[in-house]
Amino acid sequence: MIVKLVRNALGMVIVSVDVLTRWSRVKRSPEAQQKVAQAAQGMTLYHFFACPFCVKTRRAIHKLRVPIEKRSAVQGSPYREELIQGGGKVQVPCLRIQHSDGREEWLYESKQIIGYLNEQFGPA
């Protein structure tokens, strides 16, 4: 019980610091932002709200202005079952990418996810 309380308190501190220290966002023309939105339609981020690696990933998404659907994979959530069925394990953050050719890709490490997002949507 005490461990859960400490974990939740630390999580709230991490999230609060994240919100207070977000850096500037990538600037794009409305047309370029529309292309980013279209490219991101097949992406879903499975996350835990206060997980430090999830916060790091969400910060990158915010900075790059990529409108990715976010799904909480907490215990009891139907999205947790989606994560297990699709990706094979409960590990967050996880980015599900639905490619235009129909195949799915599941990226699990925050560093790998952020690298992929920078490659796809980073400033030229």
Image: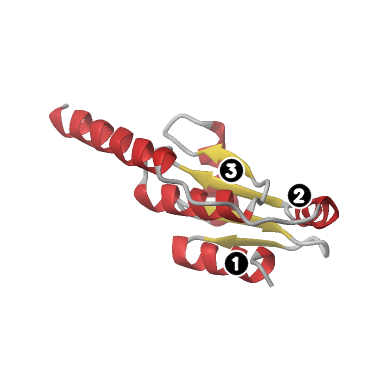
Relative side of 20 to 1, left or right: right
Residue 5 in the image: state x and y as whole percent. Answer: 20, 28
Q: Residue at x 65, y 50 (%)?
A: 65
Disc 3 and disc 1: Cα gap in Å?
26 Å
Residue 24 in the image: state x and y as whole percent. Answer: 54, 51
Circle 3 is placed at which residue position? Answer: 82
What residue type is disc 1 on? Asn
Mark identifier at residue 78? none
Q: Residue furthest right?
A: 31
Mark 1 or mark 2: which comes first in sequence?
Answer: 2
Relative side of 18 to 3, left or right: right
What residue type is disc 2 on? Gln
Circle 1 is placed at which residue position? Answer: 118
What residue type is disc 3 on? Glu
Disc 1 and disc 2: Cα gap in Å?
16 Å
Residue density around tag 3, few if under 14, some if 14–19, many if 20 or more, within 10 Å: some
Q: Nearer the viewer, mark 3 or mark 1?
A: 1
